[in-house]
Image (cartoon, rainbow, N blue to C red):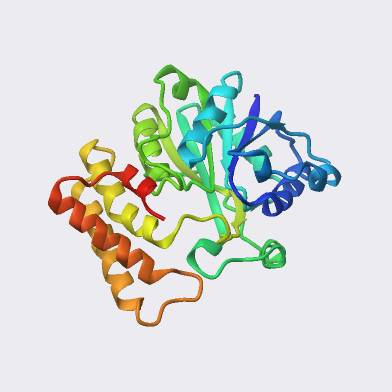
Amino acid sequence: MLIAVGIATCGRPAVLRATLVHLSRQTRLADRIILCPAAAADLDPEGYADTGCAYEVIFARQGTCRQRNAIIESAADMDVIIFFDDDFLMTRHFIAATEMLFDQFHDVVMATGLVLGDGATNAGLTGDDAARLFARPHQAHAGPPISTRNGYGCNMAVRVAPVQAHHIRFDEALPLYGWLEDMDFSVRLGAFGRIVKSFQLQGVHLGIKQGRTSGVRLGYSQIANPLYMVGKRSMPLLPALRQILKNILMNTYKSPRPEAWIDRRGRLKGNAIAIRDLWRGRLAPARILEMK
């Protein structure tokens, strides 16, 4: 089985180094590692020289969806692509376990793993935090993978054949950070097979804040992207409304005393702009390109 690792990256060359180190230590190495930056400044080749990791570089315009689509096009000769965020550190058996899973379950079109720690939900994690999490005993899951609705964008492996056969791509109408792009892609790919979560695929998502989209843009996307997905039927209406309401209430409640790592006021401002645009009939995910 031919397995590629694809990493879209932007503005975090130093962060990516740790991920390459972990890829070089895999018990089963990737057949190809494809890095897709938006610009040459997004990489630090000299800083990666001692990682022992062989990789290739392709470029695409900035945007998670655009960059991941470029990886799909480049990896058309592979059997499986594992998409990692540039700040996801995986355990040593991740690729080997992925190969076993896709070899054993031919109906699986996507697999996502167990995130031992997720810095996206807090101030962020460090490499030392990840090492401590890896050192903890984690009960092995001997059973088969369990079905799930969608993969988590920081670590999701996809079978290339159905992706190519049905021309499934990440929706580039969801620009920049591509809020919920993993769910949208999963739902469309899930029409052709099973999506599963495997507890043998493990890693830590550092959740580095550097290089993230602005609070205003994300706040706008929190409303525009779910409603856009409702329109294309990749997200049911009620879950979309629940998520939108949850985001608005959370941003409103925490804006007076926001977390140090979250721009709650910016998100709330983005929410307000999105509601105004919805009222005026001009709500669209791409509107964030006009914001800062």
| Picture quarter with the N terminus | top right
User: Is 133 situated left or right of 236 in this image?
Assistant: right
- Can residue 52 be seen at all in this image of the molecule? yes
Name the residue: 58% across, 59% down: 210
Total numbered labels? 0
Asked if residue 144 shows in the view, the reply is no
Please identify the quadrant where the C terminus is shown: bottom left
Q: Position of residue 208 (x, y in %)?
A: 59, 60
User: Horizontal and vertical percent for residue 278?
Assistant: 17, 51
Query: Which x, y percent locates residue 89?
Result: 66, 53
Q: Residue drawn at (80%, 48%), measured in percent from left and top?
A: 47
In the figure, residue 100 lies in which quadrant? top right
Write the residue at 67% across / 44% down: 41
Q: Which is more toward the observer, 258 or 38?
A: 38
Task: Decide if residue 28 is on the left or right side of residue 284.
Answer: right
Quadrant for residue 103, please give it. top right
Q: On the picture, is 217 further left or further right than 28?
A: left
Relative to 73, say whether 127 is above or below: below
Of residues 265 and 48, the one drawn nearer to the viewer in this rendering: 265
Task: Identify the residue at horizontal 70%, vertical 33% (top origin).
Answer: 30
Residue sitting farthest toward the bottom: 257
Residue 44 spot, x, y in % from top left: 75, 45
Which image quadrant is residue 204 in?
bottom right
* Above or below 266: residue 171: above
Q: Residue furthest right?
A: 50
